[in-house]
Image (cartoon, rainbow, N blue to C red):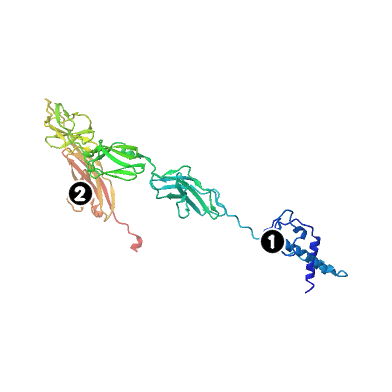
Amino acid sequence: MPAKPAPIKKKLVKKVEKAPAPAPEPEAAPAPDPEPASEPSPAVEAPPAESAAPAEGAPVDAEAVAPAEDATPAVEGEAAAAPPAEGGEAAPADAEAAEAPEEPKAPSPPPPPPKEPTSAPLDLFVEDKNDTSVTIIWSQPEVIGPSGLDGYTVEVCQDGTEDWKASNEELQKSCRYIIKNQTTGDRLKIRVVAVNSGGRSPPITLPEAVVVKEVADRPKVRLPRSLRQRYVANVGDKINLTIPFTGKPKPVVSWTKNGQPLERGRVNIRSTDRDSIMFIRVAERDDSGVYEMSVKVEDFEDKATLTLQIVELPGPPASVKIVDTWGFNVALEWTPPKDNGNTEITGYTIQKADKKTGDWFTVMEHYHRLNATISDLIMGNTYKFRVFSENKCGISEEAAVTKDEAKIVKTGIEYKAPEYQQHDFSEAPKFTTSLANRATTVGYSTKLLCSVRGYPKPKIEWLKNQMVIGDDPKFRQICVQGICSLEIRKPVSFDGGVYTCRAKNNHGEVMVSCKLEVRQPVVVEAEKK
């Protein structure tokens, strides 16, 4: 279609004519890069030839200048070859050119961020070391950047040289590393470098060279509180004592007993890096003594003292004797036991026994002296005495017995029993509770009760209408502890009357009476009908 190109050419011509020399865009720099210049720019966006002229003194690119020179004549030629239409025919074309929107410019992608290494790691120092390795730790860099952190490289070299060599084949992810397989006594310089896609960071280096050697830590025995005082155990007990200590490298542990090297026959010693254990399977008194534990690291040494005391029951007192006897008292004396059970004697127990019975009774316990006075003995009896020893374990199994006997004799005292006048308890009978009148129903048994006192015991008789009842089986007579009762079994109307209870002894006679009424049962009128 021939009509379409004409407005476009007019537009280009108009732009070229009307556009003053604009300020050059950032892309059209005085010294353009070869790559953008080689790509032809659209004709619409091409600046005028005057604006494309290079600045004075700037290098001129022939390829970049040539298209601009060629474009200007071409545009002018086209403009000349297209004369304006007569009678205003060119106005619609100019209007179309003015109304046509400019083509959008494609957005250019943002430039990728530059790749930069991190800052240097921080806080590098030695955590531990021994004769063959050095352990170091550090903190991550303060600035890591967008490239991140891939890991660390640990480099070492001998002191006095700059021959740095990486100790780890692969990047170390954590901030702790053990440099192994070193020679004892070497002096190493150590540094750490952080690595990412931007490269290596500045290194952080230890300020001084490190000597590959075990760090000597002064030894220290930490004696438990329970062992700081005398440790007491009974004969036959099992002893297992653990004493911790510290020190580096592993301390050399040694034991002595009473200043002499410890014999490992009965006492077993087992030592580890942290503690030493003394074990005795069955304790004996010979195991008692002062034990000394020594831990040594190089020229440093620490000691701790443990006093072990094995105790048992004491023996009996060496001797006991009767010193004096007077009145109802006996004085005793004794001597301490020859065997105190490897501990102090805490007291004595004294017992006595009557010769007649032979039974022993304790008269004193936990007595601390070596003499005692036994009192409150019975006159006429003969006594023997024995004494037991006591210590922390208990009382001795055997006792020291007196060879002599102590007899509490009578000293002319005659006992005269007082004369007492015998009390006369004789008394005539007397009723303390009288009989009470009663009423009962035919066929229902009833009882008559009263109480009587008197000495000698009075004889009781029951009468009915002044006639002695005797052994009539219809009546049951009981008298216990002065309580008298008469039971009338299933009475009838004939059994009613006056009943009398009579009591008599050598000192008199007394009677008490009551009236018994026997009624007929009530019959309901409905039953009669």
Image location (x, y in percent) of residue 37? 69, 61
The residue under the point 36% across, 43% down is: 249
Q: Name the side, left or right, on which 141 lies relative to 239.
A: right
Few, some or many C-alpha atoms within 10 Å of disc 2 (few <14, some 14-19, many ≥20)? some
Q: Is residue 45 visible?
A: no
Report the residue marked by disc 2.
Answer: 477
Amino acid under disc 2? Gln
Q: Is residue 459 shown above or below 101?
A: above
Report the residue marked by disc 1.
Answer: 37
Q: Name the side, left or right, on which 292 lies relative to 70.
A: left
Q: Nearer the viewer, residue 112 or 23?
A: 23
Image location (x, y in percent) of residue 503? 19, 42
The residue under the point 74% across, 62% down is: 68
Question: What is the total number of numbered labels drawn onto the structure image?
Answer: 2
Q: Is residue 321 shown above or below 15?
A: above
Q: Quadrant of residue 105?
A: bottom right
